[in-house]
Image (cartoon, helix red, strand yellow):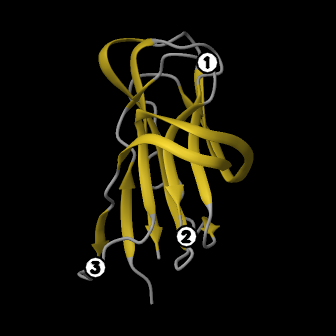
């Protein structure tokens, strides 16, 4: 039996072309998690001006170090009527996250068109694909605007998780 939740990173402005922390994920020593139904997206926040023919790469990466900063994210749920809160810690890059070193990709990465409204649809990853996150693990969803950045656009990540 498991508990399912939906996680929403909130918006993080796209202001450069280097990897930018979007969402921190940390499992405690007493719980693990499965991540699925990844939905990366680009949204307009004010007068969007993305680069022509641009793209943004979203990646789930292992991280090391001690996290500082970040805004707390409370997952929606649990879905299905259960009442136990998520045991996993999530923090949004909407408030700068520092102190971590980006490591190898951890099972998921995908490119989204750099346009206002660029996104994967809800049906994109509903094929049973998921990423296992063992106990005592730190991960970060990063985004990289490889072809430059555009004013007025922000990144968001939604996914489902089960514990």
Closer to us: 26 or 162: 26
**Residue 80 point in image, percent of width and height:** 28, 79
Instruction: Find residue 20 and report its image quarter.
Output: top right
Residue tagged 3: 80
Q: SS at mark 3?
A: loop
Instruction: Find residue 151 and report its image quarter.
Output: top left
Q: SS at mark 1?
A: loop
Q: How many labels does the image show?
A: 3
Alpha-carbon span between mark 2 and mark 1: 29 Å
User: Residue at coordinates 60% horizontally, 53% vertically from top-left?
Assistant: 139
Left or right of 104? Residue 67 is left
**Residue 87 point in image, percent of width and height:** 42, 72
Sequence-wise, the earlier of marks 2 and 3 is 2
**Is the residue under label 3 in contact with that under label 2 (CB below 8 Å)?**
no
Q: Which residue lies furthest to the bottom in this view?
A: 1
User: Residue at coordinates 37% horizontally, 70% vertically from top-left?
Assistant: 86
Left or right of 107? Residue 3 is left
The quarter of the rendered structure image containing the N terminus is bottom left
Residue tagged 1: 17
Tell me if residue 131 comes above or below residue 106 in the rendering. below
Instruction: Find residue 118 and report its image quarter.
Output: top left
Sequence-wise, the earlier of marks 1 and 3 is 1
Alpha-carbon span between mark 1 and mark 3: 40 Å
Residue tagged 2: 34
Image depth: mark 2 or mark 3 in front: 2
Closer to us: 161 or 138: 138
Alpha-carbon span between mark 2 and mark 3: 17 Å
**Residue 26 point in image, percent of width and height:** 53, 60
Q: Residues within 10 Å of mark 3 (few under 14, many from 20)?
A: few
| Residue 61 in view in this figure | no
**Residue 66 point in image, percent of width and height:** 58, 48
């Amino acid at each position: 039996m498991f508990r399912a939740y939906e996680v929403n990173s909130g918006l993080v402005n796209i202001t450069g072309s280097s990897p930018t922390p979007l969402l921190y994920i940390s499992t405690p020593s007493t719980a693990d998690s499965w991540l699925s139904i990844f939905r990366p997206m680009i949204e307009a926040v004010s007068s969007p001006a993305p680069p022509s023919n641009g793209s943004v790469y979203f990646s789930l990466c292992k991280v090391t170090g001690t996290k500082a900063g970040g805004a707390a994210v409370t997952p929606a749920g649990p879905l299905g009527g259960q009442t136990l809160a998520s045991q996993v810690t999530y923090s949004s890059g909407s408030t700068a996250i520092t102190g971590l070193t980006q490591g190898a990709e951890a099972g998921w990465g995908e490119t989204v068109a750099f346009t206002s409204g660029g996104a994967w649809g809800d049906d994109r990853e509903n094929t049973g694909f998921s990423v296992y996150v063992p106990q005592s693990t730190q991960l970060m969803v990063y985004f990289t605007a490889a072809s430059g950045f555009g004013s007025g656009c922000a990144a968001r990540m939604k996914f489902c998780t089960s514990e």
